[in-house]
Image (cartoon, grey):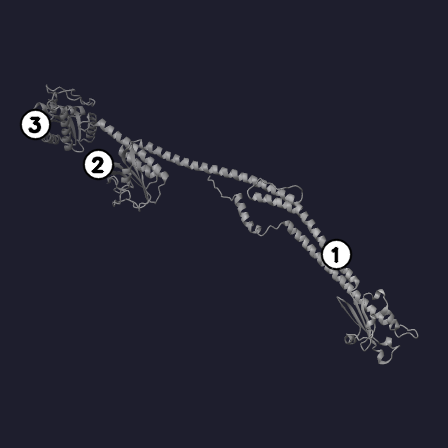
Amino acid sequence: MPLTIFNTPSLADRTRVHEAHCAPHMALGSETIGRKLLWSIALPGLVVALLGVGHFSREARQAVREGTHLEALALAEAVASTFTLPQAPGAAPHGAVAEVLASDTRLFRSVEDLRVLTPEGRIRWSRRPAEQGHPHPEASRLSATGPETARSSDHGTEVVRPLGGPECSGCHTGEAAQRMGVLQVRMGEPALTRQLQTVFQDALGAMVLFVGILGLVTWLSLRFVLTAPLKRLSEAMGRAADGDLLVRAEARGTDEISRLGAAFNQMLARLTSMKVEEIDTHRDLQLVKEKLALKDELEERLTELSLLFDVARSLNTTLELDELLSRITRMVVERLHIPDFSIMLLNEEGLLEVKHAWPQGRGLEGHTFAMGEGACGRAAQARKAVYLPDLTDSTSVFARRGLRGGSEQGSLLAVPMVHADTLLGVINFQRPETASISAEEIELFTAVADQAATAVTNARLHAETVKLTLTDALTGVPNRRHLFQRMDLELARAQRFGVPMALLMVDVDHFKRLNDLAGHRAGDETLRRVSDVLRNRARKVDTLGRYGGEEFVLLLPQVSKATAVEVAETLRRAVADSVTLSRPGLPGGHVTVSIGVAHFPTDATSQDMLVDCADSALYCSKRTGRNRVTAFEPGMEVHPGRERSISTPPADAPSTPPAPSGIAKA
């Protein structure tokens, strides 16, 4: 089940986001909650106190003003009533008025002015005796006043009352009794008002002092009860926000701040636990990632090792070079997913020759490339892998020679096959996508190329070993063992399909004398030249082999006896015309051969009989003068002068290779 890893923000990331969010608010100032509470308590209290003092002061002043107003009206009424008091005989008119005005009773202590004006505007009576008899400066205003009026102001109360009317009709008559004058009473600010002002001023000062003391007490209380604990809690939160999750807030007591600190400590404990779990989870995730990476790398390595093992096992199951190259091609295409592939081997001319290519049928096999030509030539020349990630910008494997099937797009990797410092060829891996071969694949493809190089070397060594076991080392033609294996196959085919076959036994004339005169090296050269002449004149279906010593055997499938004799005559003349020797002592100065011809099924029906018949015919050629061709005739095998290595076997005798003839053919 695949593991899905989510990228969650860490505590530090969340803290940075919180600080970024709170930074504008923190930059507004360092106003504490204690100050805010102090202002919220002291300022409204001060305002309420001031408003209360002002209100009561205004109410008191209003009450005093109203009392003064009433007092002034009552005084005016009292003074006016004195005019109606009965007078003693002989007393001055209205003497009671003068006595009242001159009295120093408590009632007149607040009176500033008390005057009685005549209708003409002169002051008749006054508390200031000096004014009596003098005109009043405001006589016109006072005389123009209608009924009794009273005016109050911040400086006092003035009452103006006209005198006269029915109450004066007893002493005065006529129209004069209706208007006798004007009574003016002016009362100043009473002492009570000043006392009230003093009281209220003292009250205001006391209130201000009380508010100050209350604010100080409140500030101290808030500082020690609220501000200081909140400050310590804020500092703890700040340290926690900076990443110190081991800090703890003070949580002594049972108030709200203590409970908040306890809750904060619990939150920090949980955050610490979560941080520890996050660290453990992160470590576990890192370990899981590392294990997954190691697992993926191990799986990739196991896949590569499995592939290399399969390559080695598959390549080591065959030693045939062509089959080996075909298996390499199939495995690379199927297992490595390479759509374009070719394998080149270094030929005898030193050129890189395409042996196998994929896709097949493009006609690329057989094309050759010189060292340094194209990517393959450069890889072979440098003996290092050449990688072209984009073929549109570089030379392709076929060097842009217009070969059909050579892709001009994609990426190409040319890897040389080198074994024991010997260059064997080049393997080309090509994909149609640009830069589609990774560094790991380059390493893998290089290992595959090394395996292929080892397998090609083994196949070539096997081929050389087989060739050495089946080929005569001197002449290069099949040796005696291979010759009789081929003879068995040809006889079996001839018997199965009912076709004829001829056997020619060729012997070099006077070979012993040639060795004695010219030496064994000249004899070896003569055998090589004779074998070359015979091989060049033979057909591809014919088999030429060295029978032993200076004798050769040539198998001619599907020929008649007459045709076989003609072929033998042609070979005899070719040897006589082509192989010459400068040493004297040989007849004619050139090398000749004698040939005996035997035919299946005319002369023999088994391998031993066929060989014996050919040997009998050859003996006849030697005996009758050499440098001639003799076809087998019945009776030749029982000539009294011929030393036979075997007796004539019966028809049902097993087929065994005969030993070389013991006849001295010198």
In three-dimensional space, the C-alpha distance between marks 2 and 3, rounded to whole angstroms, equals 38 Å
Q: Which residue is mark 1?
A: 203
In the drawing, what numbered circle is on residue 349?
A: 2
Q: Nearer the viewer, residue 216 or 249?
A: 216
Q: Residue at position x 61%, y 51% from top? A: 31
In three-dimensional space, the C-alpha distance between marks 3 and 1, rounded to whole angstroms, equals 167 Å
Quarter of the image where one finds residue 656: top left
Pointer 1: residues within 10 angstroms few (<14), some, or many (20+)? some
Q: Are marks 3 and 1 in contact (CB under 8 Å)?
A: no
Q: Are marks 2 and 3 in contact (CB under 8 Å)?
A: no
The picture places residue 51, in percent across and down from the top left corner, at 71, 59
Mark nearest the camera among 2 and 3 is 2
Q: Is residue 241 above or below residue 520?
A: below
Q: Which residue is mark 3?
A: 589
Decide if residue 563 is on the left or right side of residue 245.
left
Q: Residue at position x 63%, y 46% from top? A: 230
Disc 1 secondary structure class = helix
Pointer 3: residues within 10 angstroms few (<14), some, or many (20+)? some
Quarter of the image where one finds residue 657: top left
Disc 3 secondary structure class = helix
Residue type pointed to by label 2: Glu
Q: Is residue 563 visible?
A: yes
Pointer 2: residues within 10 angstroms few (<14), some, or many (20+)? few
